[in-house]
Structures are given as C-alpha cells and as structure tokens.
Amino acid sequence: MALLKVEDLVMYYRTRKGTVKAVDHVSFEIEKGETLAIVGESGCGKSSLSRAIIRLLPRNVETYEGKVFLNGTNIMELSEERFRKEVRWRKISMVFQGALNALNPVLKVGEQVAEPLVIHMGMGKKEALKEAREMIKQVGIAEAFVDRYPFELSGGMRQRIVIAMALITDPDLVILDEPTSALDVITQANVMNLLKRLKKERDLTYIFITHDIALASELADKMATMYAGQIIELADSESYFGKPLHPYTQKLLGSVPTLREDKEIAPIPGTPPNLLNPPVGCRFRPRCDQAMEICEKEPPMFSLDGHRVKCWLYRGEE
Amino acid sequence: MLLKVENLSKFFPIKKGIFGKTYYVRAVENVTFEIDKGESISLVGESGSGKTTLGKTILRLYDPTSGKIEFDGKDITHLTEKELKWYRRETGLVQQNPFGSMVPHFTIFKILEEPLIVNKIGTREERREIVYNILREVQLSPEEFAFKYPHMLSGGQLQRVAIARAIIMNPKLVIADEPVSMLDASVRVEILNLFEEIQEKHHMSIIYITHDLSTTRYFSDRIFIMYAGHLVERAPTKELLRNPAHPYTKALLEAIPDPDPSNRFKFREVPPGEPPSLVNPPKGCRFKPRCPIATDKCDEEPPEVEISPGHFVKCWYAQ
Amino acid sequence: MSVVSEELSLKGVVRELLSYKSAILGLIILAGLIILSIYAVLFTPFAKSGALWNDQQVWLKYPRTAAPAWTNIFSSKKLPENVYVNMGKPVNVSKEGTRIKRTYVSKFSYNYDDTPSEIIFFFNTSYEKLRPKVSIYWMKPDGENLSLGTYRIRKGGTSIYLSNNLRLISDLQEKIEEELGKKINKSLTLEDILFRDFKTGGILKGTYTVRLDVLVKNETDRVEWQGIVYGKVYGLAGTDDKRRPLHLGLLWGAPIALAFGLVASLSITFIQLIISAISGYYGGRVDSVIQRLTEIYMILPFLPMLVLVQLLYGMNLWRLLLLLIVLSIFGTSVKTYRVWVMQLKSYPYVEAAKAYGASNMRIIFLYILPRLIPPTIPSLVLAVPGYVFLEAALAFLGLSDVNIVTWGRIVEEAFSEGALYKGYYHWVLMPSLMLVITAISFALIGIALDRIVNPKLKEM
Ligand SMILES: Nc1ncnc2c1ncn2[C@@H]1O[C@H](COP(=O)(O)OP(=O)(O)OP(=O)(O)O)[C@@H](O)[C@H]1O
Ligand SMILES: Nc1ncnc2c1ncn2[C@@H]1O[C@H](COP(=O)(O)OP(=O)(O)OP(=O)(O)O)[C@@H](O)[C@H]1O
Ligand SMILES: [Mg+2]
Ligand SMILES: [Mg+2]
C-alpha cells in the first residue's frame, strides 16, 4: 500500500479577477522511503499543491476537494481539529519555500526546533529542547548554535534549522518546497547531501518541490512534471530522464544547461499559461509544436509501463 | 583592448557602534584583468563574493579604494561625475533584479527614452525611432509594450526592457548583473540567447555576472571565478571547465549537478562551511579555511600564475 | 510604513475609492461645497463680499437675529417672516389747504403665532419746497384703528423706525389702557400693540390695513414708500445682529475655507516633500542641518507664535496662510518622508539612472518625488480640515482678517455678541455645521484613500 495516495486533488483560489486553478485534479502516489520530485515553472502551482496536502490553506481558497489517503485512510475527511492533532507534523511535515528567512527572529534556534514537539506532540518544554539539541546535531550544526538567534546563522545553517524543524516529530512524509533555492551552489550541495543522508538513515519519504530539474535528479526516485496546475507526466527517474514523453518535459529538459556535456539548449517558446483561464483541452497546446486537433480535448493520463503521461500522442500505446 | 583593471580594490567603511572604530568590508581586493573589444566574460562567484561590487566599481558607480581602471586607453579611475559623462554613454548596466530597476510611474517608452534625453541624443522623433527599434531588437513589439507600465510586464519581459535600456546608447561595454537569476530556466535560455545575438551584432564587450556556472559555457569566451573578494581564476571557458585549477573552482564544478537520475545515489564532495567574513578575512588565500589541500604556505597571498596560455590561477598549488 | 511599490494609477484609485460608501458620501459633500464655492465666486459679488459684510446699510431690509426659516417646520409656533407693505396706487388724491393729499391703502394678511420683530417704513422722496408730511394709520383685523403718528420726510432716503418711537408707544399704550379700563403692568412693545388682541393677549390673525396720508406741496413732489413688518425667521441660515443674512456669509466663507485648507495642506505637504527629498537624497551635512531644523521646529510653540505674529502685525488671510506654511514646512512629517526617500533612493532604478548619467535633480524630481505623492495624499486630505479649523480658531481668538467673511469669523461674532446666552443658537450652529461638514467630507475621503494607498489595511 502506498504511503500517500492523492486522488483528484483540487484547490482553487478566489481572487478579484476570477478563480485561479492552482491545483486542478492532481493524482499521484508515493511508496514509503521513496522520493517524488515535482518540477515545474514558477507559478504552476507547486507550492499550492504542497499546501493542499498538508492542509494549510490561505483564506481565499474557493474549492478544496479530492481524496488524500495516508496509509490507507482518507485524511481529507478528518476535521481540522483531528488533522492538526493527528496528521500535521506528526505524520506529514513540511519545509516551506523561503522558510529560512521566516524564522522567528526573537526565538533561539533551539527553541524554534523544539516548537513542533510542544505544539503538535504536546511534549514538555524541557524534554522537547533536549530532543531539539539532538536533532540540530543531526542536521550538521554544532551544538554551540542551539542558543543563538536566527540572524546569527548563515543561510545554509538556517536552512538546516528549518529542515530540523520538519524532521523533529519523526514524520512519515516530509514535503520540501524549494529547500535550497535561496542558497549558494556549494551550500546547496551540502544541504542536498544532508537530505540524502537523512533519507537513508531514517528511511524518509520526501516530496521534493523545485523548479530546478538538475537538482531534482539529486534526490528523486520518481519525477513528476507539473504544468498549469496539473501533473502531466509521472515516471521513475530513470525513465523520466532517459525517455521523457510529454513534449513539455522534453522541452524543459532541453532547456537545462549542462556543465559536463556539450548539448544544444533551446528555450521553450511562448509564455506560461494564465491560471485564471487556462487553455481549453491540453494546457500546453498553445506552445506545443506537436499539437493536433484532438488536443483541444483534455487528454487523460495514459500509462506506458508505469510511465504516466497526459498527452494525446500516446493514445493507444498503453 | 577595451578595459584594463589593475589591482583594483573596493572597501566599504562600516561603523560599529556610535563611537566605534571604522571597519572595512573588503568586498573587492587586488583584482587585475583585461577585456578585449567584443569579448564576453562570465564573472562567477557565490553570493557576497564581490561580483556586483566589482561591476559597479568598474562603472564608477562606486569610487575605487585603490587601483586603476582604464577604458579605451583613458584612465577613468578618479574622474568626477561631470568628466564621466562620456563614459556613461559608453557603458551600460543590467541590474541584478529587473523588478526594482524601472521607475514605476514611467511607461516603458519613457524608461527607454530617459537615457537618450539625459545624454541629449537625437530629436524627439529620432528618439522615438531609436526606442522603437531597440524594443523590436529585444523582441518586444513597440505597439504592445511601449506604453505599458513596468508592473504590467512579466519578469522575462522586464528583463528584456532592462537589456534594451543598457544597450540603447550603443555602449562599448555592458555589465549584466545576474540578468536571468530571477527567471525560470526556460525563459533564462531565451534571454541569454538574445543577449548573445545583440552582443555579436553590436560588437559589444560584456561582463556577465552570475552565480550559475552551468549557463556560462553557452555564452562566454572567458570565465572569471571570484571568491571572497579575490579573483581566483580566469581562463577561456572550455579550458576552465575542462581543467579547473583552483580548489574553489573545482568545488564549484563538483557542486553543480547535471540532470541525471544516478545523482541520487552519490554524495557530492564539496567543502563544508561558508565563505569568510570580508571584514576580517583570513590572511593570504581566502579559501584556505575550507581548502582540502591548504598548507601553512597559504597564509601568504598567492600570486597569480599563468598555468597555460590565458589561464591564470591565484593558488600556490596550481599546476 | 513603507512606500507603496505596487503601481497605483489615478484611475485605479478613483475606481477603488468609489467602492467605499463612506467615500462616496464624502465626495458628494465635497462636490456640494465646491459647487457652492464656484457659485459664490461666479454669481455673487464675491470680490466685494468683505466690504458688503461690513456695511450696515446694505442689510437694512433683513430682520435682526432671525432664525433660519426652516425652523418653523419643527415648531408648533409659527414665527413670522418678513411682510412687505408695498405702496401701490393712491386710492384718493384731494386738496387739503394748499397741499395735495395722497391717500394710500395697503392690506396684508398676518397668520403667524408671534409678533414680528420690528416695523420700519422706508421713504424715498424728492420735492421742491416743502417737506412732505406723512401720517400712518393702522387697522387691525378686529377693526381697531390706531394712528401711528405724523412725520416730516427729508429729502432722499428716510427710514422711520416705528418700533423705536418710545413716545408713540407710550401714547398708544395709554390709549389702550383707557379703552380696557385698566392698567397693563408692563410696557408693551409696538409689535404687541399692533398685533395683539388685548382682551385675549393672543395674536390677531387676519388682514391688516395700513393707510398712509401723504401731504405734498407740488404735483411733482414724489414720495415713494415701503413698510416692512420684520419677521423672526429668515432664509436658510437666519441672520445676525447686524441683519446680515448668514447664508450669504456661509456661502462666501466656503471658497475661502476650501482654498485656505487645500492651499495650506497642499503647499505644506509639497514643500515638506521637497525638503525631505533633498535631505534624504543628499544625506551628509545637508541632511543634518535639515534634521536639526525639524527638531527645533518640533519644540517651537506653533500656535502661540502664530497668534503673536498675527497680534503684532494683524495680517490679512493670505499673509496668515503664508506664515502658517513657513511655520509648518519643517514639521515632523519631514522625518517620515525622509525615511521614504532614503528607502526609494536605494531602489535599483535610481542606480540605473546614475549609470546612464541622470543628474541628481532629475532623479529627485522625476523619479523620487512622484513616488512619494500617492502615500501622502491621504494625510494631505486628512489635514485639510485641520487648517480650516485653525483659521476658524484664529478668527475665534479675534485674529481674523476683517476684510473677509469666514466661517470662523461668523462664529466669533456670534460669541462676542453673546448669541448663545441670548438664544440665537443658529448664529453659532450654522457656521459650525459648515465647518463640521467640511471636516467630515475630507475625513471620509481621506480615510478611504488611506485604506487604498496604505496596503496594510487592505484585505486580500
Ligand atoms: N493565496 C492566493 N490567492 C490567489 N492566487 C494565489 C494564491 N497563492 C498562489 N496563487 C497563484 O496560484 C498560482 C500557483 O502559485 P504557487 O505558489 O503554488 O506556484 P509555485 O509553482 O509554487 O511557484 P514558485 O515556483 O514561484 O514558488 C500562481 O499563479 C499564484 O499567483
Ligand atoms: N554599499 C555597501 N556597503 C557595505 N557593504 C557592502 C555594500 N555593498 C556590498 N557590500 C558587501 O560587500 C560584499 C560583496 O557584495 P556584492 O554585492 O558585491 O556581492 P555579489 O557577489 O554581487 O553577491 P550576490 O551574488 O549576492 O549579488 C558583501 O559582503 C556585501 O555585504
Ligand atoms: Mg512555490
Ligand atoms: Mg550581486
């Protein structure tokens, strides 16, 4: 049984200009110990998807529905009270985009790391602080820093603190939303090393959200492409990088500059779609050079030996 | 030769406390290089390594602390703002962040016209012509964009306007400070391609500042690597990527992944730690505290050696 | 507060402003005030308003300290308005000795519940030799006939203040007492005598008849007359003790209040912006000097200084405005604006401008100042009533410009005449109402603008 199974998850925002379909019928599943990387351009709904899973919704959410099974139970049916007590941080925790810059400036980092234990696990403060100390060591920060304030730490160290906060409750699933995009490459490599190590040591399950495909390959067992609020391709990393199916994924990979091999890179033509009124049918159609007439109808997910793709090109090849 | 920089340093004074001593942030120290006409240079380094400071000092937006800048054979190191007028026409700047770089209450047309007005170029009609042409050159249709305001444009479009503004006076040197860092990868390539095209067409020299080494190979003749205010290595692009000589450059290359599913099975060998404080940097080589091959010798500042034609390294152990 | 970075177009602001009901109300009131002001300036002798206001002769035909006419709506006792007894054609012309006697009869109906405030007869005469003589007779609805005396009329305009003619009044009182056969314990007024029924003490309603016998020497001698039975209510805003109709004063006060408030607020804000821009942009010594100046200004006793200068020099309104501006330009807002300027100065676009060679002045005036204007508009609007009130307050302290009619001055005159003790509430209330309405309109607009321009208060 999959650790997490998401079925037809929908989250729309209400805005003055209309409905923003940030997460539009998204389905996927993750096995225990597996990492799913979700890649996509800025604004395609990656952060919204992660918020929808951990159910931390902005006030202006208009529609929020679908099924999310965690170890077989549909956690969408839980009341907010029960979700907060039993799921959030206990089972699913998250590293928010830009969280390293959102740490509470007047709280020592040790206390900050201990906070989830106090809030979500109802642990005493003293005990929580002891665990926090241990956790901070685990993410590679010297104990001396436990009693410092966030501004006294470098970006890389703060990112480690944020990761420690996500791991301290020993959750089954950790959602990492752009955990390194604010960091320098060497620091990023160090943090990625840390994430890899923790994954191995603790048999962690990650959802790794990034716009950087090369970085995604550092962690991903499975890759998903998100485009305009939908997941349009989902496959194991080998298959995804070796033989991408969706024209968008192909172009996305083709636009990534590489350091070690000589390859031509090409931009993706056109502009990303507007989530207020996305194109009818396949959402990539206006930018796709292989678009056909049928693309005006929304393609279903085709599955080619477990490699799933939402594109009419693969009709009949299942 | 277009630009010659010799032992250039820029220190920022900072005061600690009200009566405290003045300290200096040694953002750029002892930097020497030359750039030819039409050459494109990538200046690569981590955040805070002094790339922007170096760029702005070259453009005389900052006054150099010491050293010398020669442009087209003329010493511009200590010219006053008045004497710099001609230099402003010969240089262009694309800033790090396109979002704050345009006067919000001006239309794109006005934004692009301003440099021309300030430098008294052309009549009203001529300026209009110039602005429309430059918009076409950066692939924005003048009819659609000339009278929009900056907040109506996407990041990529703004970046094009920023580029258009930098090249509108047909300068000999453009400094592009992370012109694509705010953009999505797919748009990034497009903008960089555009840049390359324009640069070749106008035969401009470009210093392209970035922290992203992976894009540089596509767009530059030479790469300069900066670390903590020092220029630690400079070499032709292929040479640098193939034979990195400075331990920092090697670490940088090691840290950058290419898309490859086997990445997840290995750890990257990168030095731990962070770049040093520039107020109180280590003596000698600034990479020493993190360097796997450092010795006591490194407490002395290494000289720059040319290990192969055009490949300069500032390291005692470079071969 | 941070400077708004999001673009606020004028159109957008207006559209958003119109989504606030309170702002719409404010705008409607303000529009009303503006229309009043335009009307006052274009269609009334506004340029001469000060002189007119000070000239007592102009207002003779208005009742004294009359309440606004609409107060009758709210009162069971209907107070009289002015009744005009007009000349008409003579009903009879006859010879009396060597003289010619012209008899005029005028009727008017009187149905109010109170006596009028005053009775005056106005004459306009031209004659050759002898002064004309006029006898006035009064017939009440119940048929009682009273002779109101005989008067010689001088050349030109003459007014006969019957109500002040104490001889006549005491004669009439005696006559009435005789008829009643008993003494009346108080001295009656002429209005009591002419309009009351002495058996009941009530007002006699019905048709009154006035007869005038005019004796002239020559056929060509001309005597024109008009009698006015002055009411106790008048117009929209009543009158003051000098018979001046307050609605005119309020009307003339409107453009002045608006202009004073707006000019003060606009110019102070604008000059402060420029000073802050220079201070924040250049920094260094210029900045220190300006900052010290603002600190000195902060401890200066602003109002007393204003009063003192005004007492010593008795300036007119516009000089006062100038002084006010001078005394305010280094106000505390300079500090706030300066912080904004320093923030804007660090924006990349300023650096970009330097990179293409723009001068400092260009950067300040074209790039920085326009950014500061939107966030200052709410406080600018909100400050307007403050200056309007300040002018009123100075007027109230007796420091107003005597050559201009302002709301403050009207209030001041009311107080110095003891209007509130004497029950002339309208005299104080009407100008105060104008002040308050003005304040409310600016406040409603300003608060809404603040919400729009200051995104902290804005919801998603
Ligand atoms: N609270 C909100 N109200 C309305 N629209 C929103 C809200 N949050 C996000 N959006 C919009 O929804 C879309 C998806 O946003 P989201 O933050 O999920 O994108 P993302 O893929 O995480 O982008 P990035 O890579 O830039 O972080 C965007 O168009 C965004 O503007
Ligand atoms: N005006 C200034 N005053 C004081 N210190 C400064 C100033 N500008 C830059 N610095 C410092 O100089 C150092 C170099 O900064 P610089 O902006 O040149 O780095 P950078 O390489 O461009 O970094 P990034 O990639 O983040 O843009 C940093 O430590 C920075 O804090
Ligand atoms: Mg996001
Ligand atoms: Mg920089």
Image (spheres, grey):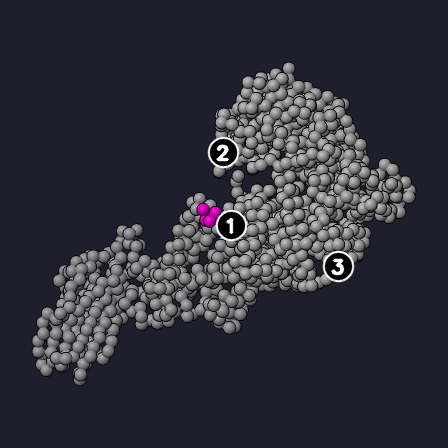
Closer to us: C356 or C393 = C356
Of helix, strand and loop, which one carries label 2? loop
Q: Which segment did they paint magenta?
A: C11-15
Residue type, label 2: Asn
Residue indicated by mark 1: B147
Left or right side of C9 for B309: right
Q: CA distance from mark 1 to mark 2?
A: 25 Å
The CB of the residue at mark 3 lies under 8 Å from ligand 2: no
Chain name for mark 2:
A
Task: List x then y, in percent, for residue C203.
Answer: 21, 58
Q: Is residue C457 above or below residue A259?
A: below
Residue type, label 1: Phe
The CB of the residue at mark 1 lies under 8 Å from ligand 1: no
Closer to us: B76 or C280 = B76
Label at residue A277? 2
Task: List x then y, in percent, for residue B136.
Answer: 56, 48
Task: List x then y, in percent, for residue A158.
Answer: 72, 36
Q: CA distance from mark 2 to mark 3?
A: 57 Å
Q: Main secondary structure of the magenta part?
A: helix
> Residue at horizontal 55%, vertical 31%?
A288
Residue indicated by mark 3: B73
Chain name for mark 1:
B
Do the residues at pointers 2 and 3 share their chain? no
- Asked if residue B315 can be seen in this view, the reply is yes
In the image, which is nearer the foreground, mark 1 or mark 2? 1
